[in-house]
Amino acid sequence: MDRLHHTFANEDERENPEVDMETFLTTLLEENPEVTHVETFADAGLLTRDRGLVVRLKGGPSGPAAGRKFQITIQEDRRHR
């Protein structure tokens, strides 16, 4: 997980940690051969102010989630800053 450490190495320099996490997760998901499509909520046209990703997995009988589409919401836990 060197990329995670590198991406969030200096918390004081982060302008928007939810955007940083969105970018990081997009990179990880796009590297996964079981994922066929990743886009942000904004790019997908979802009417929300939340940050997040829409992820589609490959079709076929390879598992219970195969061929399905998921929405992953990203919200920083600000209670323990």
Image (cartoon, rainbow, N blue to C red):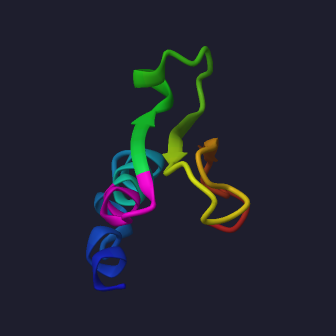
Question: Residue at position x 60%, y 32% from top?
Answer: 50
Spot occupied by residue 18 in the image (x, y as percentages of width and height): 48, 48
Q: Residue at x 52, y 43 (%)?
A: 56
Q: Give the image location of residue 44, x and y in percent.
A: 47, 22
The mark tally for this picture is: 0
Height in image: 28 above or below 20? below
Quadrant location, the N terminus? bottom left
Displayed quadrant of residue 39: top left
- Is residue 28 a member of the stretch shown in magenta? yes
Query: In the image as oriented, which residue stretches furthest toward the front?
Result: 61
Q: Position of residue 15 (x, y in %)?
A: 34, 47
Towards the viewer: 67 or 15: 67
Q: Residue at x 28, y 59 (%)?
A: 13
Left or right: where does residue 74 sit relative to residue 63? Answer: left
> In terms of depth relative to the viewer, which is nearer, 7 or 30?
30
- Residue 31 included in the magenta stretch of the image: yes
Q: Could you tell whether 66 is left or right of 56 in the image?
A: right
Extreme-bottom residue of the structure: 2
Q: Which one is nearer the viewer's eye here, 44 or 17?
A: 44
Q: From what the image shows, is residue 28 above or below residue 58?
A: below
Locate the C terminus and report the quarter of the image it occupies: bottom right
- Residue ID at (67%, 58%): 77
Magenta segment range?
A: 27-35
